[in-house]
Amino acid sequence: MPKNWPTKAVEAGFVEDKEEYYDRLHEATNYATREVVKARERADDQQLKHSIRAMDDCERTANELAERAAEWAGSLFDDAEPGIEGARAVAKREPNGELERRAVSLAARVVDLAAERDALAETIDRIGPAVAPNLAEMAGPELAARLIALAGGLEPLAKKPSGTVQVLGAEDALFAHLSGRAPSPKHGIIYTHEYVRNTRPEDRGSASRALAGKLTLAARVDHYSGERRETLHEELRERMATIRARAEDGGGEGDDGDTDAATEGDE
Amino acid sequence: MTDPELPAGVERREIGGETRLATRGPPVYGEPTADGWRAWDPGRSKLGGMFELEFETGLSGGETVLYLGAASGTTVSHVADFAGPTYAVEFAPRPARDLVEAAEPRERLFPLLKDARTPNRYAHVVESNVDAIVQDVATRGQAEVAVRNSQFLAEDGRLLLAIKARSEDVTAEPETVFEGALDRLREAYEILETQRLDRFHEDHLGVVATPK
């Protein structure tokens, strides 16, 4: 609850009078806001890119090492379980002799790597919204970071057409398609978004296109203005509601060439 | 020349050959100035628009103000020019950089990088019983933000609110959106005056309210 802070500060003897309190407050709020702004600006798109790549490396390496640690522990202890959770149990053991010491130590590295992965995920959750507020809100900080990393930065992402954003992360499938070996991919990494994944298969093309269209606009607003724009999010919600209503109507073919959301112009 | 409906420190001045709303203070965003007075563009400021439309704001100058949605400081710099201690809450870091620039030469303007939707995060800084809350946040749930922040407002204080219809629902009729927002507001406030700001800001409703 707010209180009469100026009076309290005077009563506590922190300042002589209210005027001095406000002088101090001005100094403190200006300093703090300036510092936070500076820190957040340092957290730029390239830092986000490093963070997400490091997070993926930690996760992959932790899983690989966990397999090795579990196999080893299984030969030494009766009740060794696989995976990161298994490694956690092994790491808590009191080792007997050199071999057990090494196996337990290896499991401890797995646990540390998994913890580092989680810490990186938290960092991404924190700096994602500062680097790209609209993109992070629409995609979630993790997917936003992946899109930025795949494009090579926020600016290159902001300059991509939405059709490219739609298939970012599906380059293999795209080149298979271009060389005539496969149908065109409907979505790349944006597949992990709830709007695509939880839409019925026949409407996923429309959902991906709508989502990619708005993600592209979100990246542009983030790059060029940096301010949150509620209308973008609202429009996407509306569009998704329409697409999903088809399933309730029992409507058949979803891919009716509704490219509206994907081709909307810049703001 | 002081208009009766304008607070002390806000005047209509001759600037660049036009009579314009103005306050006295260091320039912030390249606005036209004359004799130390800075033009206050009602087309860029909801509160400026409310003054032009002669809302009874209850402001007389020198008040303690909580400003929600300060953005880069355009409007709040004018407020700090005529008001007393002014707390400026803004969530986005990029505009906040400009806000700090506006606050630097204004000794009673306090920038806070906080989310107006979570007042508990700044209740340890913003004092109780402020005379006025000025709100211009372009986020969904604008009435909800005003309700949550009513804890800061003095019993006879004023809420000066601009509701942007498109922030609530892009598809609904603005009138419907405004009615819904006013219903939510009435849970914590008594509405004193409402008027469309369309002359200056399309699909915006200006609201003056006081705590219930």
Image (cartoon, rainbow, N blue to C red):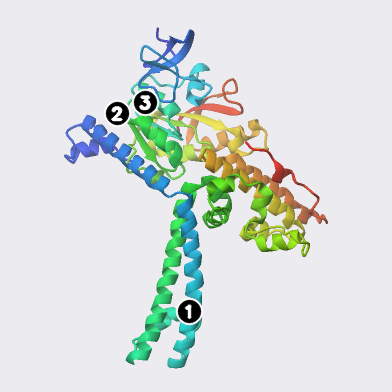
Nearer the observer: mark 1 or 3; the answer is 1
The N terminus of chain A sits in image quarter: top left
**Other residues around mark 1 within 10 Å, as few (<14) / some (14–19) / many (≥20):** many
Residue at image coords 51%, 65%: A56
Label 1: chain letter: A
| Mark 2, secondary structure of its residue | loop
Tell me which amino acid carries mark 2: Glu
Pick whichever, B201 or A175, lies toward us: A175
Residue at image coords 42%, 78%: A88
Tell me which amino acid carries mark 1: Ala
Marks 2 & 1 on one chain: no
Say if residue A113 shows up in the picture.
yes
- The alpha-carbon separation of the residues under discs 3 and 2 comes to 9 Å
Q: Which residue is mark 2?
A: B107
Tell me which amino acid carries mark 3: Ala
Pick whichever, A85 or A184, lies toward us: A184
Q: Quadrant of residue B166?
A: top right
Q: Quadrant of residue B168?
A: top right
Pick whichever, A77 or B136, lies toward us: A77
| Mark 1, secondary structure of its residue | helix
The C terminus of chain A sits in image quarter: top right
Nearer the observer: mark 2 or 1; the answer is 1
Q: Which residue is mark 3?
A: B80
Q: Check residue B57 in the rendering and tell me which mark sits there, or answer none.
A: none
Label 3: chain letter: B
Q: Which residue is mark 1?
A: A66
Q: Position of residue A108 (x, y in %)?
A: 39, 78
| Mark 3, secondary structure of its residue | helix
Q: Are marks 2 and 1 in contact (CB under 8 Å)?
A: no
